Image (cartoon, helix red, strand yellow):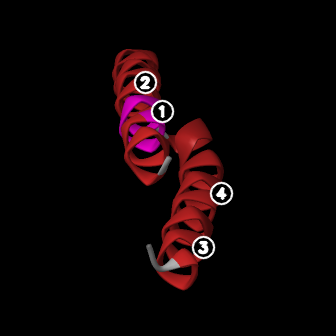
């Protein structure tokens, strides 16, 4: 497994989250809730994918 690629993926995720936090105050409440919910779903999917990859590497 290429750890450089994984590092790039993590850095991209962090950068995207930072940009999202900067833009979030400009959105209305309904959109904010939707973005937060989608973020939670994506986080769960990413955690599952990470666990699966780490399981395959063992």
Judged by its main secondary structure, the magenta piece is: helix
Give the structural element (helix, strand or loop) at label 4: helix
Give the structural element (helix, strand or loop) at label 2: helix
Badge 1: how crowded within 10 Å, few (<14), some, or many (20+)?
few
Membership of 42 in magenta stretch: no
Q: Which residue is mark 1?
A: 47
Give the structural element (helix, strand or loop) at label 3: helix
Disc 1 from disc 4: Cα separation: 19 Å
Membership of 47 in magenta stretch: yes
Disc 3 from disc 2: Cα separation: 19 Å
Q: Are marks 1 and 2 in contact (CB under 8 Å)?
A: yes
Q: Position of residue 3 (x, y in %)?
A: 56, 76
Q: Which residue is mark 4?
A: 18
- Decide which of 37, 46 is in the foreground and name it: 46
Q: Which residue is mark 2?
A: 44
Compare marks 4 and 3 and give the one earlier in the sequence.
Answer: 3
Disc 1 from disc 2: Cα separation: 5 Å
């Amino acid at each position: 497994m290429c750890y450089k690629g994984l590092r790039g993926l993590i850095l991209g995720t962090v950068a995207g989250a930072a940009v999202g936090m900067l833009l979030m105050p400009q959105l209305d409440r309904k959109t904010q809730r939707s973005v937060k919910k989608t973020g939670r779903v994506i986080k769960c999917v990413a955690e599952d994918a990470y666990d699966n990859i780490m399981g395959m590497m063992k």
